[in-house]
Amino acid sequence: MGTADIRESILVIGASGRTGGYVVRYLCAASVPVIACVRRAERVPVEARLASAEVAVANLEQPDTIAPLIDRAAHVVYLAGGERRGMSPGAWQLEVESLSSCIEFAQRSGFTGRWLYVGYSGAEQRGGTTWAEARWRELKLAAEQVVTASGLNYFVLRVGRITESVSGEPRVQVSQPSTPMPDADVPCNALGFLLTGVTLAGCTQRARATVRLDNSGVKLQAAVHSFARLRSDETERTLDRLDFSRMSFR
């Protein structure tokens, strides 16, 4: 069982991916203890910015290998998952079942930190695509539902397509739309910055938001601060239940 006095590290699951690598870099730059969880150690770049990270090798197909890392985590940034461009035979296990197992470990260990997950802003869109893309959307939606039904202090940041890194700081728009936004594209380093900011600065508990590039939007730091002003999912559900039918304007 994990105990609060040893939960001092940020656990990044999927740290060898494009976005995960940037999250680890930003956390190291902030001098925060970070555990970079990867499947193969050789996939972690050898560079000075990553030198302070603890590299832990674990296999999502064997989730019990990740349990000891979750026991040490103050917060978890979950970025593991299959490639959008193709569907492997084990995609459901990787995208949904492994995530569910990791969350169960967190629940049993008394994890009280933030669980960050990147969702797809077009997951609820229907039609007009290939079978593989439709299946990938279903997996992302099912995975997000696993997170939001967990009871953990989650934050789901929805994006459309995660693009290559950019050299200049982009401006973004943050929203909580109820309609799919499949074109909400975000560069991987900007997404990494936002996730790192949420991890360190905090956000509304149990909330979801969509972020997209917008030249008239806000800078990344301002976007991070806006996450603390989001409506929680509990608030959304309460508003849905309210009955305004008997109200009249006088």
Image: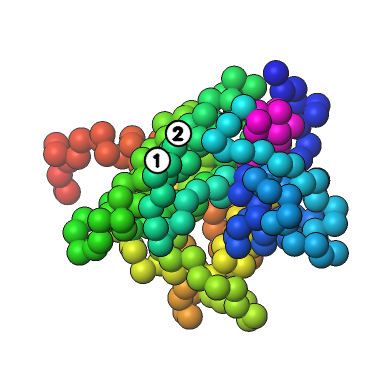
* Residue that lies at the very extreme toward the front in this rendered image: 89
Residue 153 is situated, as x and y percent measured from the top left of the image, at 55, 35
Magenta stretch encompasses residue 69:
yes
Instruction: Give above or below for 76 relative to 32.
Output: above
Residue shown at 41% from the left, 49% from the top: 88
Residue 149 x/y as whole percent = 42, 31
Color theme of the render: rainbow
* Vertical arrangement, residue 53 with respect to residue 58, above or below: below
- Residue depicted at x 73% and y 55%: 42
Q: Report the residue at 71% width, 33% height from top.
A: 69
Amino acid type assigned to the residue bearing label 2 in the image = Glu
Q: Of the numbered discs in the image, which one, if any, rests on residue 97? A: 2
Q: Which residues are magenta?
A: 65-77
Q: Mark 1 vs mark 2: which is more N-terminal? A: 1
Q: Is residue 226 magenta?
A: no
> In what element is the residue under mark 2?
helix
Give the quarter of the image for residue 85. Answer: bottom left
Given contact means CB atoms under 8 Å apart, are the residues at marks 1 and 2 in contact?
yes
Left-right relation of 80 to 52: left
Tell me, for residue 215, which label it has, or none.
Answer: none
Comparing 128 with 148, the one in front is 128
Residue holding disc 1: 92
Residue 244 or residue 232, whichever sits in front? 232
Residue type, label 1: Trp
Seen from the viewer's position, the closer of residues 134 and 10 is: 134
- Nearest the viewer among 217 and 1 is 1
